[in-house]
Amino acid sequence: MEKIQHKNVTVNGIKMHVAEIGEGPAVLFLHGFPELWYSWRHQLLYFSNKGYRAIAPDLRGYGDTEIPSEISSYTAFHIVGDLIALLDILDLEKVFLVGHDWGALIAWFFCLFRPDRIKALVNLSCELRPRNPLRKPIDCLRELLGDDYYMCRFQVFSHSSRLTS
């Protein structure tokens, strides 16, 4: 692990922590919830040994990356914007993109918003599910998986009747 280099860069108005190692074609790893760059530590070492530049940031609001206070600062546009700015700072035109869980959802948006910056995508655990513009995603998850599903449990409710013990 001591070979992995850490730095903080300013992207899209926030300071972002980035772990990276290796030289060659770049592979950008996006962590899930509630993980950090650290969840990719073994893959960083593996890919760097295979001739790749392996990069894993702490996404916006996680780990040593800045935590904007406004909820509205956490849209897919913001997070993909952070990653595009990161690629620009690292002077990378295109990357292989790997996402897991929450990071996989961001990776799907990254590919939809900026396909010109992606060589290929590998996603783990989350399929692409186009959003129904007439329904809130959390309402769909609650209906399908119930109030105890982890994403539902992290919501703030305006009606006390929805809270469960």
Image (cartoon, rainbow, N blue to C red):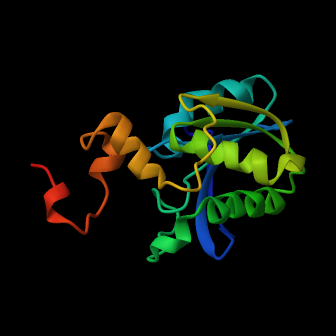
From this view, report whether residue 56 is shown above or below residue 160: above
Q: Nearer the viewer, residue 27 or 112?
A: 112
Q: Nearer the viewer, residue 107 or 146?
A: 146
Residue under the image location 34 percent in, 44 percent down: 142
Residue under the image location 65 percent in, 40 percent down: 29
The percent position of residue 63, horizontal first and vertical second, equals: 45, 56
Q: Residue furthest front?
A: 134
The percent position of residue 145, horizontal first and vertical second, equals: 33, 35
Q: Nearer the viewer, residue 118 or 15?
A: 118
Q: Is residue 24 left or right of residue 21?
A: right
From this view, report whether residue 130 is shown above or below residue 114: above
Q: Is residue 18 left or right of residue 63?
A: right
- Which quadrant would residue 95 be assigned to in this image? top right
Asked if residue 56 can be seen in this view, the reply is no
Q: Is residue 102 left or right of residue 123?
A: left
Residue under the image location 44 percent in, 76 percent down: 69
Residue under the image location 31 percent in, 58 percent down: 155
